[in-house]
Image (spheres, rainbow, N blue to C red):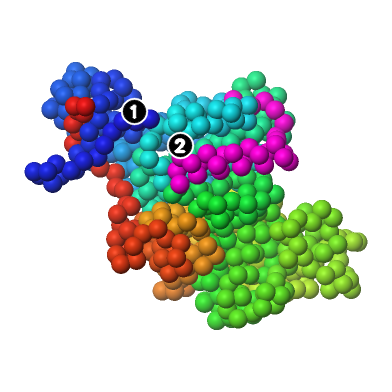
């Protein structure tokens, strides 16, 4: 682990960093490296005099050079590699650069490019970051956690790589997802990178192309399941609780069944959150609330079709269902507002291999018994659109182009302002493009997408498309939880996050602006969400801080900004 302390000078009252790390080791430690910004005094004291060019630069000057270097690259993957390399050399400079160019760089570091880096992980691997807990090393879990770099941990993002984005089982390559997520926590919510930890649970892979790849870096074994998998997860949770009792644990990209069972089993044992289920649900509901306000049709009167009933589709449906109950419907009435589709068509109660999470949303097959369908014994999306006449259509299928012109025009025939969210990513898996949706609905659609798209020029209007990106909400949720050390992430805290996000919708001021803010508004947006979440945690008694102090102060105390502190050599 790193050895350093941030202290305050008793005379000047200024912060400084004290460390016993010096020489070349200091210059190759990304968490502490200042490169050409080390002062002459620091160079003498820390044993790096002569190891750097003579000029002493500011962070701003370094950032200017880094941006010029970034601009030299022409492809997105090249730019990603450059930024990741900078992250591995000098974290403070990396975050200074990215927070100065959020709109340009977040799509390079996060969705959609992170999907490409995951698939290329075994070829492009350069430098270790985070912890790999491999099943064969399970008896050494305590030792592995003790080998972490950052001593104090506030947030962990963990994955087992089974359900990555829309590309499925990626085995060890999924480690790029927790790394990218933690970057977003820092960029969007000011979580100190010195207090974060990405973890890969390597339990094998069922992706045969990876198992056959001679360069595959993970445990070359079929993916664990059943009792062995559950025992491994249980031991992981035990270890995390022992080492970090107040940590916020973020589950990411687990397979559909394990994502649900892990959340259900451990949600009240450790402060935890599943982004694929809860984060996707929160950000989608926030966008939906903003869209509903625009249509002037109450949420309780909406008819909602969800195309794709995996972790994301179920999570979104659950979050919206919770909102409907909060607005006066019974649970039965709320679930009656949903029609979910899987690869097998409309989800009905007689479907084989029904999961527990899907059961509440399955329709009675008698409801559609007299429908005249395009294919015998199969009720597809066109059939549901024709007979249900939905007002809301949400795509979580990863089937690119699934929202065809016929489907969208049929929907638009029955509703003045159709709400359409093609949320699948990467971009090529989006169910439709905003340009087509605007054209097919004569400019009436209210759209949010999972991947970033350029504004649409339609007649005399420029319509900006909101990205329904989890990165807008999970950083603020995490910040709020960490700020007050909440023992659990409750449904009421998630609802507080939804309403705080919806209140900030740009469309409230201009009908051609997005349903959600752009990512470059992240820090203020995250702060608003964090304050709402933290207040709710205090109100319900799950916070471990005093309620006598303003919540805003707890949140602001957690904000980290990329800046260099003066360094001093430890004398102990």
- Total residue callouts: 2
Residue at the image position 46 percent from the left and 68 percent from the top? 540
Expressed as whole percent of the image width and height from the top left, the position of residue 216 reads 62, 25
Expressed as whole percent of the image width and height from the top left, the position of residue 510 reads 43, 73
Expressed as whole percent of the image width and height from the top left, the position of residue 347 reads 78, 62
**Magenta residues, start to end:** 217-245
Residue at the image position 70 percent from the left and 77 percent from the top? 333
Residue at the image position 52 percent from the left and 62 percent from the top? 490
| Snapshot quadrant of residue 118 | top right
Residue at the image position 38 percent from the left and 35 percent from the top? 150
Residue 291 appears anywhere in the view: no
Residue 516 lies in the magenta-colored region:
no
Tell me if 64 is positioned left or right of 427 in this view.
left
- Which residue is label 1 attached to? 29
Residue 382, compared with residue 158, is above or below; it is below
Q: 160 or 342, which is in the foreground?
A: 160
- Which residue is label 2 attached to? 80
Q: Earlier in the sequence, mark 1 or mark 2?
A: 1
Residue 313, compared with residue 226, is above or below; it is below
Residue 150, compared with residue 52, is above or below; it is below
Which image quarter is the C terminus in? top left
Q: CA distance from mark 1 to mark 2?
A: 20 Å
| Snapshot quadrant of residue 11 | top left
């Amino acid at each position: 682990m790193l050895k350093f302390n941030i202290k305050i000078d008793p005379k000047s009252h200024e912060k400084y960093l004290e460390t016993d790390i010096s020489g070349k080791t200091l210059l190759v430690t990304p968490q502490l490296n200042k490169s050409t910004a080390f002062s002459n005094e620091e160079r003498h004291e820390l044993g790096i005099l002569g190891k750097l060019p003579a000029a002493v630069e500011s962070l701003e000057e370094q950032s200017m050079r880094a941006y010029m270097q970034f601009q030299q690259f022409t492809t997105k993957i090249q730019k990603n590699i450059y930024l990741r390399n900078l992250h591995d050399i000098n974290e403070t400079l990396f975050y200074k650069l990215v927070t100065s160019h959020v709109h340009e760089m977040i799509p390079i570091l996060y969705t959609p490019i992170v999907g490409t880096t995951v698939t290329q992980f075994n070829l492009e691997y350069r430098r270790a970051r985070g912890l790999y807990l491999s099943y064969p090393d399970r008896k050494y879990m305590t030792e592995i956690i003790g080998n972490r770099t950052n001593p104090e941990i506030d947030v962990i993002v963990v994955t087992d790589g089974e359900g990555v984005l829309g590309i499925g089982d990626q085995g060890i390559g999924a480690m790029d997802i927790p790394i990218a997520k933690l970057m977003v926590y820092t960029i969007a919510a000011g979580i100190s990178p010195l207090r974060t930890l990405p973890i890969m649970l390597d339990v094998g892979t069922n992706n045969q192309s990876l198992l056959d790849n001679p360069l595959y870096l993970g445990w070359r074994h079929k993916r664990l399941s059943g009792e062995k998998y559950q025992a491994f997860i249980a031991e992981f949770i035990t270890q995390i609780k022992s080492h970090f009792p107040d940590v916020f644990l973020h589950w990411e990209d687990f397979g559909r069944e394990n994502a649900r069972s892990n959340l259900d089993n451990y949600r009240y044992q450790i402060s935890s959150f599943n982004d694929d289920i809860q984060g996707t649900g929160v950000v989608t509901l926030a966008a939906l609330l903003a869209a509903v306000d625009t249509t002037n049709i109450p949420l309780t009167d909406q008819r909602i079709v969800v195309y794709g009933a995996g972790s994301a589709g179920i999570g979104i449906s659950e979050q919206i269902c919770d909102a409907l109950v909060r607005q006066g419907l019974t649970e039965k009435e709320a679930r009656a507002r949903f029609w979910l589709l899987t690869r097998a068509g409309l989800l009905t109660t007689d479907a084989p291999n029904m999961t527990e999470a899907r059961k509440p949303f399955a329709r009675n097959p008698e409801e559609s018994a007299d429908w005249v369908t395009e294919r015998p014994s199969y009720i597809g999306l066109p059939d549901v659109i024709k007979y249900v006449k939905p007002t809301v259509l949400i795509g979580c299928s990863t089937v690119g182009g699934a929202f065809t012109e016929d489907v969208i025009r049929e929907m638009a025939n029955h509703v003045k302002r159709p709400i359409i969210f093609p949320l699948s990513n990467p971009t090529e898996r989006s169910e439709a493009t905003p340009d087509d949706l605007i054209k097919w609905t004569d400019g009436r659609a209210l759209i949010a997408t999972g991947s970033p798209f350029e504004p649409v020029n339609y007649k005399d209007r420029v319509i900006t498309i909101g990205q329904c990106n989890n990165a807008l909400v999970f950083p603020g949720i995490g910040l709020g939880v960490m700020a007050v050390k909440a023992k659990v992430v409750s449904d009421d805290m998630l609802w507080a996050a939804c309403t705080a996000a919806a209140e900030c919708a740009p469309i409230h001021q201009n009908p051609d602006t997005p349903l959600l803010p752009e990512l470059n508004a992240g820090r203020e947006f995250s702060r608003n969400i964090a304050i709402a979440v933290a207040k709710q945690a205090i109100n319900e008694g799950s916070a471990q801080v005093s309620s006598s102090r303003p919540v805003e102060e707890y949140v602001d105390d957690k904000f980290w900004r990329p800046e260099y502190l003066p360094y001093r050599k430890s004398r102990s």
